[in-house]
Image: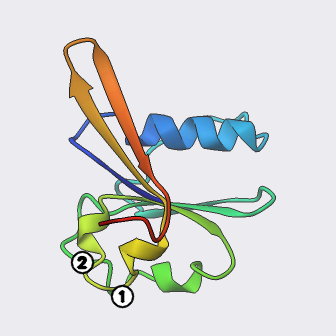
Amino acid sequence: MLLSGDLGAGKTTFVRGYLESLGISEPVRSPTFNLLQVFATEPPVLHADLYRVKSAEGIGLEDYLDSHACLIEWPDRLHGLIDPKGCWQVHIDFEAEGRSVTVTPPDSQT
């Protein structure tokens, strides 16, 4: 799942809710400095925050793609590592009334 939106839009809050639905009750923080955080849920979850990198190349993200539900913040840093058309995409925007969330399923991007 590719999560996009401005800094502070609520990407990590979205991940927190996703993990709570899988039974995680511990605090969920953005892995901004360690980049990747793994949760032993069913299915296992990888939360990646690529804000501080120019590219995801070499950080080991590809090791989790086939075995984990991957929630990736700042997907613009993937640079071809993942085909976005094959991923759920969640875009969060600030609006006057609060936030709007646009969810696009795989293979439906135009």
Going by the image, does 68 lie left or right of 94?
A: right
Q: Name the residue under label 1.
A: 58
How packed mark 1 is, by other alpha carbons closer than 10 Å (few <14, some 14-19, many 20 or more), is few
Query: Which residue is drawn at the image coordinates 23% and 61% (left, top)?
Result: 52
Going by the image, does 42 lie left or right of 82?
A: right
Residue 31, visible in the rendered structure: yes
Q: Distance between the residues labelled 2 and 1?
A: 8 Å
Going by the image, does 94 lie left or right of 65?
A: left
Q: Where is residue 91 in the image (x, y as percent from the top left)?
A: 33, 46
Going by the image, does 72 lie left or right of 25?
A: left
- Callout 2 touching callout 1 (CB < 8 Å): yes
- Quadrant for residue 96, please give it: top left
Against 56, residue 43 (above or below) is above
Q: Which amino acid does label 2 sit on?
A: Ser
Q: Element type at marker 1?
A: loop
Residue 28, visible in the rendered structure: no
Q: Element type at marker 2?
A: loop
Q: Position of residue 44 (x, y in %)?
A: 72, 63
Q: Position of residue 83 (x, y in %)?
A: 39, 80
Q: Mark 2 points at which residue?
A: 55
Q: Which amino acid does label 1 sit on?
A: Gly
Query: Which residue is drawn at the image coordinates 49% and 67% (left, top)?
Result: 106
- Quadrant for residue 98, please give it: top left
Q: Where is residue 14 in the image (x, y as percent from the top left)?
A: 49, 38
